[in-house]
Amino acid sequence: MLLAVAGAPRVFAQGIRVEGAVRDGSGASVPGAQIKLSANSYSAATTTDRSGAFAFDGVSEKSGTVVVTANGFQEPRQTWTTAAGVPVQISIVLQPLSVNQRVTVTAARTATPLGEAPVSDIELMHEDLRATPALTLDDALRQVPGFSLFRRSSSRTANPTTLGVSLRGLGANGASRALVLEDGIPLNDPFGSWVYWDRVPSVSVASVEVAQEGASSLYGSEALGGVVQFLTRPAEYGGVSLETSYGNQNTQDISLAASGGIGRWESTFAGEAFHTDGYTLVPEASQGSVDRDAYSQHGTADLTIARKIGADGEAFARGWYFNDSRNNGTFGQTNSIRLGQGALGANLDFGSFGTLQLRSYAVFQTYHQTFDSVPLDQNSQHLTDLQTVPAQGIGGSAVWSRGLGKRQTLVAGFDEHVELGHSNEQIFSAITGNNLRDTATGGHQRTAGVFGEDIIQIAPRWTLAVSARFDDWRNFDAFLVTVPITPAGPTVTLPYASRSYTAFSPRASLVHEVNSHVSWSASVYRAFRAPTLNELYRSFRQANNLTVANANLTAERLTGGEAGIAAQEFNGRLQFHGSFFFNEIINPISSVSCQVTPLPAICPAPTANTFTFVRANLGRTSAPGFELDWLARITDRLQLSGGYQYVDATVISAPGQPSLVNQWVAQVPHNELTFQARYTNPSLISFSVEGRMVGMQFDTNQLPMGNFFVLDAMASRSLTHGIEVFTAVENLFDQEYVSTAATSLSPAQRGLPIAGRFGMRFDFPSKRCRFRRSTQHPLNSSSDNTFQRRPIYWGALT
């Protein structure tokens, strides 16, 4: 902080003038900060304007203090003094809150200091995402070791049904084994639980929180392996942010966020448009005449209108639209999705009686997919399947929380959601091209759950959190209708029996702050995941691999625990976190090969030029491992960070499939390593370098894919306030690596080759590093996360 007294006196008839500006550590202005001036018996208060400036006129004293309050920053107190009649000018630089003062909302489903959350919880701020060379949000999250999708490919070109999330080696099966939220609203597909990562405009994201423990005790089925939540920017101060870029593969992207308010009304809008010609998935040596670049394009829009209620309450309405289409690497294989979603909600503050968050949403979508059979030489193709999958999801929740004194917080809630969808298919012969049959299959799934949580500071440096949830879910109105076409025959209708299940999911965690430098935590938990409508009723094809649905699947059950330690030294310039974890899943859903002996009873009859798999519950898998993360701020401008995870994800038992026992869990590497070097100098140049090493893994348990290393880089320069240009390169050295393993019927597919782009960022007014999330922001639990420049945070460093 710097205080200076102006040299030229200006005498005011009724006192002196005290004025100044408030900025953060990067030099960006901080609007909306509360300024309180005290001088003996005189006191006054104001807020900073959009440029971060403030002023008090008519101050009758010659000395006093100024206190600045802004969410996400420490509260400085500055004294001032002056000669009679000389105005005072003050420049105040705010420092970010310490870790124990910062707040996370995901792990406990209510605002919780990071110092009281498990040390494995991760928070990536807007500036962390802004500094990564990755174009898509899922690729940006790969800097978290253990975060992966079902396959190694990126959402920029992959089939969306392979975009489910895996954390800590649990693996994905197309369906995500983690819940993904945007401001408390699920992003998981209602039919298949995969994730459309492109639905969230990247420029609108204020922060991302990743809770890597089983979280069914608060969130229910889809949070088997944890929760990933995107928290978007608030509407409080208005303005526009835009990012646009162009790169090789004819990749074009524009992302926009705007917000403003009038009186007690406020609104935000975010949108994004993207197109890429993509690249040919099959390596050049194996390409044939049917191969083409796997292009994709999408557009998304997100509008919120909200009205403040009282001092801290708010009601809102929100709507999304998303349209995505892509080619899957040959001329005949395409997919597309159209999706609309609406949400209503309120954040209500009842003072000493606590707060209540109400949410309701409805999503309607239609997915289209075509599948081909392609021989190994890639020189011909035959249409095998046309799919149309309409699906809907409707849900709502109520979450009440109340603080009891300063040491205890109670949380209780209820939520219910219903998913319904059908897969309508035309099946063709891969040999003759004849339409063999038409089918329609699908059903309904209803889930309702109640939960409670008690977070209590049992001693000054000890925090205990205990939560539990009871879920009841039911599958009903399920059917399979088959209409033979060639040869013609009678329609066959097969109704599936309704089934209902229950699950109890407890969790307990203990956090101990040993001193101001070291803390540790330990957790134990149970979690579950119900099979999706997609896994129960819809078949799909990847190249020449056909995966068949199974209406008799049962829920996955997880038991797990973790223990970790976090430490920091040199005023937070050196930070370290390490955790040991263990997760075991009973009845994990996996794709089982029908090319084994003995043949699983649920396998269909063999089909020419096709490897057939069927979804089935294995007996048991385990995933013990450990993770290490570190960060070093070498100077105020240079920081280094990195992470490593080892996980031994193994099939422990597989009744009827003895060949799978002791095999690695499919699509899970044992070793992952990431690192980042970042230099920040807005007045000159900023750059970052990221590396990622992924160890060997297996596709469908028995097809090996070798390890690989990719390096990404980015450089940017600020031209003037609010305008920045940048260039970024992914896979800088054009490392070729396998994303889908080769079989005897189809060649391998490769991951993203070198992808460069250049672009511009525009913020008006200049708001880089200064947005914050308020407790009134719609669609989110209370939180004070600051949208500002800060290092990647790896856990609850105290």
Image: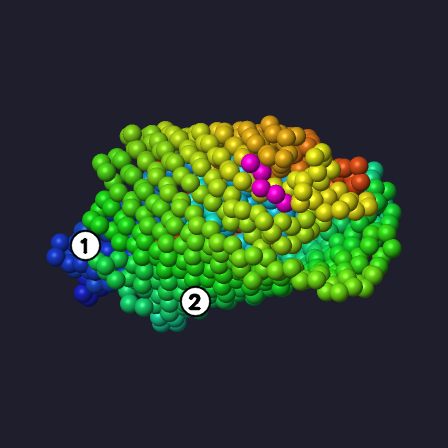
Q: Which residue corresponds to the image point at 51% horizontal and 43% vertical from the top-left? A: 556
**In this rendering, position of residue 607 left or right of residue 669:** right
Q: Residue 501 at what x, y percent from top left?
A: 47, 51
Q: Secondary structure at mark 2?
A: strand
Q: Name the residue: 56% across, 62% down.
A: 477
Question: What's the magenta region?
Answer: 615-619
Rendering coords of residue 71 (x, y %): 34, 52
User: Which residue occupies 37% across, 65% down?
Assistant: 346
Residue 533 point in image, percent of width and height: 58, 55
What is the three-letter code of the residue carrying label 2? Leu
Q: Is residue 554 left or right of residue 58?
A: right
The stretch drawn in magenta includes residue 199: no
The answer to whether the residue labelled 1 contacts the one labelled 2, judged by CB atoms less than 8 Å apart, is: no
Q: Main secondary structure of the magenta part?
A: strand
Q: Mark 2 — residue?
A: 344
User: Which is closer to the viewer, label 1 or label 2?
Assistant: 2
* Residue 38 image label: 1
Looking at the rendered structure, the kind of residue marked 1 is Ser
- Give the camera-side residue of 662 and 404: 662
Quadrant of image for the N terminus: top left
